Amino acid sequence: MSPRPRILHLAHNKADPRAWTAAFRTAIAQIGDLTVVEEGELLSDTEASIRIQDCDILVTSWGARAVPTSLATEPGDLRYICHLTGGMRTTIPLELIDAPIAVTNWGDAQARSVAEGAVTLLLACLKGLRFRIERIAAGDWRLPDEFRSGMMNQLDLGIYGCGFIGRCFIDMVRPMGPNLHVFDPYVADVPDGCERVADLDTLFDRSHTVAIHAGLSSETEGSVTARLLARLPDGGILINTGRGAIVDQEALFAELESGRIRAGLDVLKPPEKLAPDHPARGWPNLILTGHSLSQPFPKAYEAADAFEPMHHICIDNLRRHLKGEPLQFVMDRRRYELST
């Protein structure tokens, strides 16, 4: 009988409670011998390397200690790094992606949740939901005569980024009848019924509303410029559930302050929050959700059955690895460089 695999999580400080729920730990314990080491920030790179070299599988996540680059050439017994969550640049160096060690991440685990958030923001902006709620709360029952509500049917809707989340978003909105325009130079094809456009200029020229689903990279950072925002029609909408740094935030806020366009933003540029007295908090044409639309309620982490899609994907990949079966969502250099 072969020995049970040694599975390690090395936390920078404390194990993240959303990632390392009791249900997830129990599921891993059925597969192998799990060791969770906290306060990994106190370990030198040499000490951390020794701990990792002595395991078969390393599971990383939010809050994990950075993996030493030396493991790319001196992995010891390490054969697989299963990254439970999404972006990994601050945790797993590129050298390990190029090394003969399998690395995976959560793939499409968050796609449905984030896409639902984007659809929520889009419909709320299109129907002027914030304006309606605040007007009624202030004592007015009727909207002003000039107020107009939009419809998804025949809406010219641009999608910037057609990865897991972008495709899920398209599947959700397609039944409502928008005209879909897609810009993503990195995908081989776009879903049926979508018009593929060659550049962002064309995307913004043809769209009343643009939803951002691109990852943050050197190419996408700041790519939604003041010039592009100006190409949106009066009353146009920008939805961003990707990364705030993709957009020139000062230019966007200038457009919003003027009242010319509307926006639903789950994300802002770092540090991803506004001062309590920032005027943007009060603009009726802006909905802010504080980078939280795809997160469950915090108490949900403590539930006995707290098991999210990311946990299912991780457990499935651990089992695949131990059986010698193909892994899902294998990370290569191209995916790594495009992932946020």
Image (tube, rainbow, N blue to C red):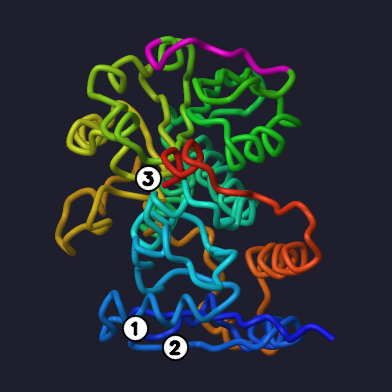
SS at mark 1 in the image: helix
Labelled pair 2, 1 in contact (Cβ < 8 Å): yes
Q: Quick check: is 301 in the magenta stretch?
A: no
Q: Earlier in the sequence, mark 3 or mark 1?
A: 1
Q: Nearer the viewer, residue 260 or 305?
A: 305
What's drawn in magenta, residue-wise?
A: 193-201
Mark 2 element type: strand
Spatial CA span between label 2 and label 1: 7 Å
Mark 3 neighbour density, 10 Å: few (under 14) some (14–19) many (20 or more): many
Query: In which quadrant of the rendered image does the N terminus lie?
Result: bottom right
Q: How many marks?
A: 3
Specify whether 209 is left or right of 311.
Answer: left
The location of residue 177, given as percent across then percent down, is 71, 24
Q: Quadrant of residue 37?
A: bottom left
* Crowd class of label 2 (few under 14; some 14 to 19; many from 20; radius 10 Å): some
* Residue that mark 2 sits on: 37
User: In the rendering, at what x and y percent does residue 189 appear?
Assistant: 65, 20
Residue shown at the point (39%, 49%) measured from the top left: 94
Q: Which disc number belongs to residue 243?
A: 3
Residue 226, given in percent of the width and then of the height, sits at 23, 23
Within the image, what quadrant is residue 166 found in?
top right
Residue identifier under label 1: 40
Name the foreground residue: 114 vs 91. Answer: 91
* Amino acid of disc 2: Val
Nearer the observer, 75 or 328: 75
Cα–Cα gap, marks 3 and 1: 28 Å
**144 vs 213, nearest the viewer:** 213
Q: Is residue 200 magenta?
A: yes
| Measured Cα–Cα span from mark 2 to mark 3 | 31 Å
